[in-house]
Image (tube, grey):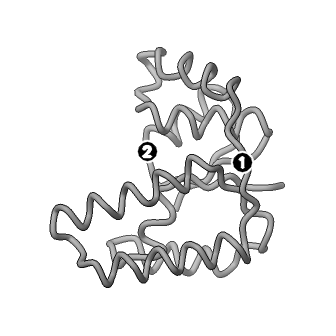
Amino acid sequence: MKSYFDTSIFVPLTVLELKTKAVQQWFSECEPMEIVISDWTVVEFHSALALKLRTGQIDAGLRDGAQELFARYTSENFQVIEVTRADFGRAATLANKEALKLRAGDALHLAIAERQEFQICTLDKHLFEAAAVIGVQAFTI
């Protein structure tokens, strides 16, 4: 089964964080090209690094290295899929469900995984729990 990775996996994969070792170990065991991301993942990843730079958590050199590593992974290991108008509509519906506790970006990731019938891989607790509620297979570390 193909796995859709949300952005929460990629930041610790490319920048030293608490979960880096666990994410790197798990990632090394994944089958290349069984990993799917979306155009939204790319945008969100760069936004996360920009936030880390603005808040002094990383410097420009670390950001640039993380972006290069992500670009290499994207070209060698991931299938990148487009986000559709239907994905945005479904994400709006999911984000509107108070019990799911989803932010807009996470609702979009979940909508994409649901439409494609992919397992979603995330470090985000609310996204993991919401996936189970709507019947999308989910994995977390």
What amino acid type should be assigned to the residue bearing mark 1?
A: Gln
Q: Which residue position is annotated with label 1?
A: 119
Badge 2 marks a residue whose secondary structure is helix
Label 2: few (<14), some (14–19) or many (≥20) C-alpha neighbours in 10 Å: few
Q: Position of residue 75 (x, y in %)?
A: 70, 73
Q: Residue at x 66, y 69 (%)?
A: 74
Q: Is residue 1 left or right of residue 9?
A: right
On-image quarter of the N terminus: bottom right
Label 1: few (<14), some (14–19) or many (≥20) C-alpha neighbours in 10 Å: many
Badge 1 marks a residue whose secondary structure is strand
Kindly report the distance in space between the C-alpha atoms of the residues bearing marks 1 and 2: 15 Å
Q: Is residue 37 left or right of residue 116?
A: left
Q: Residue at x 53, y 42 (%)?
A: 128
Task: Check the image and report above or below for 74 versus 4.
Answer: below
Q: Position of residue 58 (x, y in %)?
A: 24, 75
Q: Position of residue 29 (x, y in %)?
A: 69, 78
Residue nearest the viewer, comparing 3 with 140: 3
What amino acid type should be assigned to the residue bearing mark 2?
A: Lys
The quarter of the displayed image where residue 102 is located: top left
Q: Which residue position is annotated with label 2?
A: 125
Task: Check the image and report above or below for 48 versus 125.
Answer: below
